[in-house]
Amino acid sequence: MLKFVGGRLLQGVLVLLGIYAVTFFLVAATPGSPFSSERAIRPEILQQIEAFYGYDKPVLERFMTSLTNALQGEFGPSAVYANRTVTEIIGQSFPVSLKLGAMSLGLAMLIGIPAGIIAAVKRNTWLDYIPMSAAMAGICLPTFVMGPLLALVFGIILQMLPVAGWFGPEYWVLPAFTLGLVYAAYFARLTRGGMLEMLNQDWVRTARAKGLNERTIIWKHCLKGGLMPAITFLGPALAGIISGSFVVETIFQVPGLGQWFVRAALNRDDFLILGLTVLFATLIVVMNLLVDIAQVALNPRLNYE
């Protein structure tokens, strides 16, 4: 097990280094700089600013300096927001995005997995058709459509929930549901497929023929194998929730990392782009590692390779 985890960690570190390098050189190759603006800046002042942020050095030297600082957890000052470092911005905004992502993922699993189990057990009945029809509709509706619809219905027409801000639990509902419902649909369909595969096994028919209780067959013998597709989907789900949060945080004015990423891209804030990219990539790598460990724990037949 330790060898398995160590191998996955090494792969994750190499992936993060590759992502950092690709992001750095793509940003460096982009025309202009964070200090380009319509307002003319005196050449000597522009030269001093670029020297302060290291833009006067060769690209490879800047990359090595930036990578060394990143390995120490420092990404430098923001090139746009004065007197603020990238670490400070991430430290203030990350808890918000983490809370939104955790609530969305938990909501998706809480809705999707039970719905998939019920649909599989009650297949070809209304308890199967209704959840799966709703799941298909959820898959077809992206977050940038779902968000405004929920805001229109529950925020403006019914006036039940606020549609902007992050000041209390009532403000968390619409963003969390917007992100969570789409992935609840995926969890529902994957869980249904996994459970149906397990319920159609020969040993299940043998157990039923011997008179074994149906509840015992489902919860004790089929559930672990039936949940494998849903657990495998946790990694891509996290990636989707992270990328989807850019749109959702903008729609509902949530002060999380998604808004900062959009602002950094628009303002060409190189250091902030690098810091946020590394953070998001680290979250995905860690989540995929946990998913791999969970798969091996649930299915002992898998090798630690």
Image: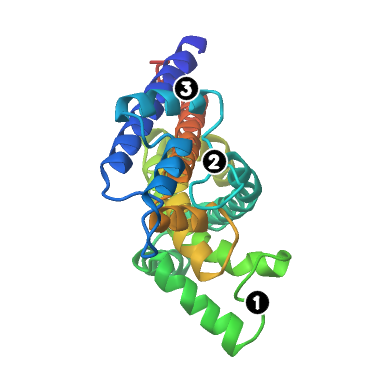
Evaluate whether residue 210 shows in this view: no
Q: CA distance from mark 2 to mark 3?
A: 15 Å
Would you say 220 lies left or right of 282 here? right
Query: Does the residue at mark 1 contact the one at mark 3 (Cβ under 8 Å)?
Result: no
Pair 2/3: label in front: 2
Q: Residue 182 appears in which quarter of the rendering? A: bottom left
Pair 1/3: label in front: 3
Viewer-closest of 36 and 94: 36
Which mark is first along the chain, 1 or 2?
Answer: 2
Amino acid type for the residue under numbered disc 2: Pro
Relative image position of residue 212 (x, y in whole percent):
55, 38
Residue drawn at (45%, 63%) of the image: 247
Per the image, the residue denoted by label 1 is 162
Amino acid type for the residue under numbered disc 3: Thr
Amino acid type for the residue under numbered disc 1: Pro
Q: Considering the numbered disc 2 on the image, is that residue within a helix, a strand or a loop?
A: loop
Per the image, the residue denoted by label 2 is 77
